[in-house]
Each structure stands twice: as C-alpha cells, then as structure tokens.
Image: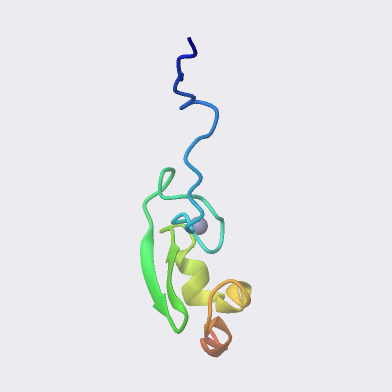
Amino acid sequence: MHEKRLKGETKKMNNNQNPKQCVNCERTIDQVPLIPVEHRDGQAYICPQCLPVLIHKPQMLIGKLAGAEHLGGHQH
Ligand SMILES: [Zn+2]
C-alpha cells in the first residue's frame, strides 16, 4: 500500500509575483517598512532610508523606477 505523503517542505510556495521590495536597496517588506510609490508602470516601493535618494538623487533610481529620469533633482 502506497500512502501519499505530503511533500509540503520540498517546494516552498513559489510566488512569482513581485515581492514588495525597495527599488533602491532591494530590501523586502519583511525586513523594513516600505512606502508605496505609484508610477506610470504601476507601483513600486521604497524604504524610508532610501527616500532621500528619491528626493535628492533621483538619477540614482533611473532604470529602477519608471519616470525617475524626469524627476531631475535639485540643481543648485
Ligand atoms: Zn531602500
């Protein structure tokens, strides 16, 4: 008699959905609180620590965050 055993441990649920993670440092919502940022392609998240980057150095987020290239930053 073959009993089907549950192999629940072999595969952890493969979530192919994007995990919520900071666009800059890529830490996940499990590690740090994240702030949702809406952009033209949908929604991204950024952590409070990287928020100054978004504000002062948005060019660092070009390629990571849609529309970042238009933020410009402050040039003094
Ligand atoms: Zn971050």
Rendering coords of residue 42 (x, y %): 42, 76
Q: How is the image coloured?
A: rainbow
Q: Identify whether 31 is placed above or below 17.
A: above
Work out whether residue 76 can be spotted.
no
Residue 70 lies in what quarter of the image? bottom right
Quarter of the rendering occupied by the C terminus:
bottom right
Residue closer to the observer: 73 or 7: 7
- Compared to 51, does 62 lie above or below? below
- Residue in the image at 36% along x and 51% along y: 33
Residue in front for this viewpoint, 23 or 9 = 9
Please name whichever residue, 46 or 20, is drawn nearer the observer in this view of the structure: 20
Q: Looking at the picture, how far across and down is residue 20, in whole percent? A: 44, 56
The answer to whether 28 is drawn above or below residue 74 in the figure is above
Q: What percent of the width, then of the height, locates residue 4?
A: 46, 20
Q: Is residue 6 above or below residue 17?
A: above
Q: Residue 52 location in percent, x, y?
A: 47, 67
Q: Residue at x 54, y 74 (%)?
A: 65
Q: Residue furthest front?
A: 1
User: Residue 46: which quarter of the image?
Assistant: bottom left
